[in-house]
Image (tube, helix red, strand yellow):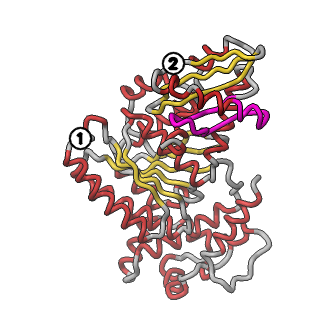
Amino acid sequence: MNMMTIKKFHEKIYSLLVPDLIRPKKIKELKDMDINIIKGIEEYADLIKSKLKVKKIKDMAKLKQDKAVEFAEKSDMDPSLLEEWMTISKLIVRAEKYRGEIAKKVMLLGIDNAGKTAISKTLTIKYRGNLQQFGQMLKDLLPTKGAVQDRLKVSNVNVMLWDLGGQQQYRRVYLQEPERFFFDTSAVMYVIDIQDEERFDESMDYLERVVKIFHFLKENPYFMSLFHKYDPELEMIPKYQVFIKDLTKRVSKVLSDANITFQLRNSSVYNDLTVFNSFTELIRIFANVDVQATINQILEKHARVNGLDNLVLFDLSGVRVGEFVQSDEIRDLINALTIQNLQMLVMEDEQVVVEFDGQYFSAVPIYLEGKTIILSSIHGDPSVQEKLLHETPTELEPWLESLME
């Protein structure tokens, strides 16, 4: 049980209630209290009690949506206010069952056919080590029905990926029951289909409503907006560049006006590195993942699997961008030997093996998803050369862009 996140959850609930409330000993006691404890309801409380026969928080939580909207319209009341009070009541009722954050919640949001399911499956396959399934996955995709959850582990961060189906009937449910779907969210990937110009306005409308809900719930997730289906063959077509420029302005305004921290990126599952890079950057930012430390951890894991005491990663300029070493002396020696042989590694694309004092220095240039890297090591096993070349730590792929631009 995560006591810290439970405490934060309780404080968030109390922030939605009147400030002079005498807090009960247990959070579950709130559900039996008068609806007057909800902040902002005072003006309408008596009317709600007399017309809807709702007196306690638990009664408000059970109120039907259609009945509430009908009442609000007849009473010249903003229906969204009543919906907010109902949401607060539902949060209170659920409070006693809250057990704290067990994984960082990342939401995939957007209207239907935006490409969320393909992104979700691409990430799931990637982080579960089943890349051979990727091609078949693209053929077998079906629209997501409702909310689908997948647990992933990215750089020692436990992530619960929520793929919320974008069909209108599902969106209506999410917006009517926000406490079930939007609460406790760490980050959002909002997906817009760059090829579907006719639905840009619909997508922007949904984004605005989602942002409003997060604001009401006092949630402040990090946003990554993806201009998706920007497939390689579209990159040189002018109209798509115009679409992206226009959407960049519109999305930026919505998120900036709401004081939400965000990034905008282009993506395509046919260039899956764009998806991986966006996702890992999202994780890195909201989870405060140190990219350098992550790369070092991957190198250490790869070195130990291959029986190595050291493994150093360089870029094409000979700059060290990651390492697993046992001593400064070994690091300096690997640096010197790599720089000394840099021309052969980079310009001639050749492997290097240098024997000295019964030891071997090995360095291999490797082309890894758009980046050429150099892996160097000092060791006593001449077979390591082939291992470095053919057993590349592919976990490095998503993290390279952040360090090697």
Image: 219 above or below 196: below
Residue 214 x/y as whole percent: 50, 64
- Secondary element at tag 2: loop
- Asked if the magenta segment contains residue 88, the reply would be no
Name the side, left or right, on which 173 lies relative to 333.
Answer: left
Task: Name the residue beneath numbered marker 2.
Answer: 350
Q: Report the amino acid beneath label 2.
A: Glu
Other residues around mark 2 within 10 Å, as few (<14) / some (14–19) / many (≥20): some
Residue 401 x/y as whole percent: 49, 41
Identify the residue at horizontal 61%, vertical 38% (top origin): 320
Q: Distance between the residues labelled 2 and 1?
A: 34 Å
Residue 204 x/y as whole percent: 33, 59
Task: Name the residue beneath numbered marker 1.
Answer: 236
Viewer-nearest residue: 142 or 79: 142
Viewer-nearest residue: 356 or 239: 356
Q: Mark 1 or mark 2, which is nearer the start of the sequence?
A: 1
Quarter of the view holding residue 68: bottom left
Image: 193 above or below 347: below
Count how many numbered circles sit on residues in the image. Answer: 2
